[in-house]
Image (tube, rainbow, N blue to C red):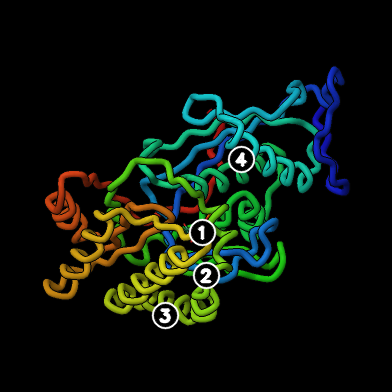
């Protein structure tokens, strides 16, 4: 039987040849959506706990999700991870293993896990999957361990795997409170998905895997002279974006979302070593989006994460027109569309 010991903090450590500690398995499957931040998370106060330098605001993306099955299995001699049908390499496996260690400690599980994960969006589109991946992994691991956690704790646990994963646990429009400890750094919903029909039209300009991932980027953020100013002014932008969303005020929303994205990229470009995530085409799109809004009155604005793809946020009524305009801008652009997504959920057994 799998051992569940909430009081102890046992991570599985087994020497060679030693028999597994448990001999059966417990399985569950969960799904979580990716999210796009309107006020960005960049830089940590505590890297180990992924306590962010500032609070952030996002919406979940209904069209982009990860479905993950966790099998806590006493017959395994090591954790296993398959992503989209392929055994994960040491980098992804090591990161999943670290997160599984934290979950084992929390749930008192004394077994290795077999983790099978599938993204519904194509790998290699340059669309980051760590938020949906760690939110789905956390929810599936908890369900498999027969734990029903409050959403707030699920979000805090997901944060340990990838900061932005905290925001993929609650539904719709979400605020991640930076907090000052593991327990106080969690995300919660402030409006449901149906509150405002925004669409993220993602302009894919590069399919390359980014050279510097966000975990490494968070570590260099403090080396930028601009980071203190960005962090100090983030609470005002969180308030402004949240209130613009609640009032469905697109113009106000657009100006703060673009400013926040520019501020994060200014920090990235002035860090040591500098990080340049934009592609020349990214800038072409950013300028076009501003022109469309300011000169033609189209409700659309841009935001970019740690990569060159441009997330064009618009009212649902404009999504097809925005997609068409993006495709017509230049040859190397593909588009994907996503509305506002639900929170992480456990799927019924098949
Ligand atoms: O959760 P991470 O470590 O992948 O960091 C996400 C960082 C950004 O996507 C650039 C910003 C954000 O808030 O999502």
State the CA–CA distance, disc 1 to disc 2.
9 Å
Which residue in the protein does label 4 denote?
A: 140
Across and down, in percent, residue 339 comes to 33, 54
Say few, some or many: other residues with alpha carbon within 10 Å of mark 4 (under 14 / 14 to 19 / 20 or more). many
Residue 330 visible (yes or no):
yes
Q: Do the residues labelled 4 and 3 touch (CB within 8 Å)?
A: no
Residue at 55% over, 77% down: 228
Which residue in the protein does label 2 denote?
A: 224
In this rendering, the label closer to the viewer, 1 or 2: 1
Left or right of 204 in this view: 17: right
Which residue in the protein does label 1 denote?
A: 273
Q: Are marks 3 and 1 in contact (CB under 8 Å)?
A: no
Which residue in the protein does label 3 denote?
A: 240
Q: What secondary structure is marked by label 4? A: helix
In this rendering, the label closer to the viewer, 3 or 2: 2
Q: Are marks 1 and 4 in contact (CB under 8 Å)?
A: no
> Which image quadrant is residue 313 in?
bottom left
Image quarter where the N terminus lies is top right
Residue at 25% over, 47% down: 335
The verdict on label 4 being within 8 Å of ligand 1 is no
> Which is nearer the N-term, disc 1 or disc 4?
4
């Amino acid at each position: 039987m799998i051992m569940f010991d909430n009081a102890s903090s046992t991570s599985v450590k087994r020497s060679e040849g030693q028999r597994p500690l448990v001999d059966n398995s417990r399985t569950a499957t969960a799904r979580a959506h990716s999210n796009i931040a309107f006020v960005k998370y960049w830089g940590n106060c505590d890297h180990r706990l992924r306590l962010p330098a500032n609070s952030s605001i996002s919406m979940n993306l209904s069209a982009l999700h990860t479905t993950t099955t966790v099998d806590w299995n006493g017959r395994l001699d090591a954790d296993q991870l398959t992503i989209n049908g392929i055994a994960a390499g040491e980098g992804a496996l090591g990161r999943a293993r670290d997160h599984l260690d934290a979950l084992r400690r929390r749930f008192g599980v004394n077994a290795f896990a077999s983790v099978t994960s599938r993204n519904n969006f194509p790998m290699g589109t340059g669309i980051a999957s760590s938020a949906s991946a760690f939110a789905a992994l956390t929810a599936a691991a908890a369900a498999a361990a027969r734990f029903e956690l409050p959403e707030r704790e699920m979000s805090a646990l997901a944060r340990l795997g990838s900061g932005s994963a905290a925001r993929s646990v609650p539904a719709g429009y979400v605020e991640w409170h930076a907090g000052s400890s593991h327990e106080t750094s969690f995300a919660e919903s402030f409006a449901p998905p149906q509150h405002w029909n925004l669409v993220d039209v993602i302009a894919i300009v590069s399919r390359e895997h980014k050279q510097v991932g966000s975990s490494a980027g968070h570590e260099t953020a403090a080396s930028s002279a601009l980071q203190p100013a960005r962090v100090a002014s983030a609470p005002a932008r969180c308030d402004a974006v949240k209130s613009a969303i609640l009032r469905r005020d697109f113009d106000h929303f657009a100006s703060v979302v673009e400013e926040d994205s520019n501020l994060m990229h200014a920090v990235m470009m002035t860090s040591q070593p500098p990080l340049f995530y934009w592609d020349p085409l990214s800038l072409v799109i950013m300028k076009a989006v501003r022109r469309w809004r300011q000169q033609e009155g189209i409700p659309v604005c841009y935001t970019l994460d740690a990569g060159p793809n441009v997330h064009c946020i618009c009212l649902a009524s404009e999504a097809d027109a925005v997609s068409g305009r993006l495709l017509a801008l230049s040859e190397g652009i593909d588009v994907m569309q996503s509305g506002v997504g639900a929170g992480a959920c456990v799927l019924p057994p098949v």
